[in-house]
Image: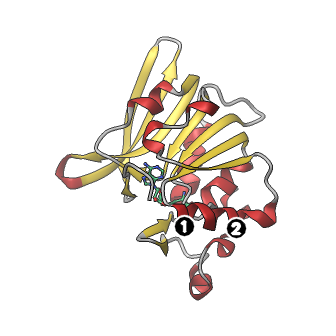
Amino acid sequence: LVGSVERHRFVDTALVNQAYEDTSLPIGLGQTISKPSIVARMTELLLGAEGARAGGLGRVLEIGTGCGYQAAVLARVAREVYTIERLRALHEKARDNLRPWRLATVHLILGDGMVGYAKGAPYAAIIAAAGGETIPDAWVQQLAVGGRLVAPMAAAGGRQVLVVIDRTPHGLQQSTLEAVHFVPLKSGIA
Ligand code: SAH
């Protein structure tokens, strides 16, 4: 799945020779394209949601568009992808990167993803590519019943861990997975 999206199209020309290594790479403004193995890991976790049918996911929200790579991967498994980025320059870069694919189901939004994106809610899945101290309430509120949220979050000792929250008919279920290294979740648009 991840291998089916040409990653070299999302990085600067100077980094093209590293595009297929399993490392994160700079995309400008101090941000990074996630490493392919973590994109695969998080996408698989989303597909494990209770509400994910054989046909894949319904509406998905991504916080942190970056260069648009994860959004292109999500477009292969979701009916609609809403992806939000707070940095205008990256929002525009993602738009340029994604243009050749003509993905009519990917909606690029310039905004503060801390508040989610209410217009597309409820979501079958929510994925964040930036980590904060906590999981914003808005994300959980915008999750459909049967939906799953996967996001990095601060943990003890300055670490960051991957958190999964499932909205079941009986309430929320949260689990903590492995340590990860994502850029910080910040508020406001810049
Ligand atoms: N999924 C991206 C990874 C980008 S890195 C990719 O495939 O390339 C994470 C991104 O999250 C950064 O571009 C950063 O600017 C953005 N970000 C951080 N806080 C945010 C917020 N509150 N709302 C939207 N985007 C945010």
Labelled disc at residue 72: none
Labelled disc at residue 96: 2
Instruction: Report helix, strand or loop for mark 1.
Output: helix
Mark 1 sits on what residue?
89
Question: Which picture quadrant has residue 57?
Answer: top right
Amino acid at pointer 2: Asp
Percent from the top left, x then y, of residue 85?
A: 53, 54
Image check: 62 left or right of 103? left
Asked if residue 121 is positioned above or below residue 77 in the image, the reply reads: above
Percent from the top left, x then y, of residue 49?
A: 59, 31
Compare residues 113 and 171 and report the one nearer the observer. 113
Question: Which picture quadrant has residue 13?
Answer: bottom right
Compare residues 117 and 168 and report the one nearer the observer. 117
Image check: 157 left or right of 9? left
Coloration of the structure image: secondary structure
Q: Is mark 2 within 8 Å of ligand 1?
A: no
Instruction: Report helix, strand or loop for mark 2.
Output: helix
- Residue at screen point 68% across, 62% down: 95
Compare residues 104 and 177 and report the one nearer the observer. 104
Q: Residues within 10 Å of mark 1 (few under 14, many from 20)?
A: some
Between the C-alphas of marks 2 and 1, the distance is: 11 Å
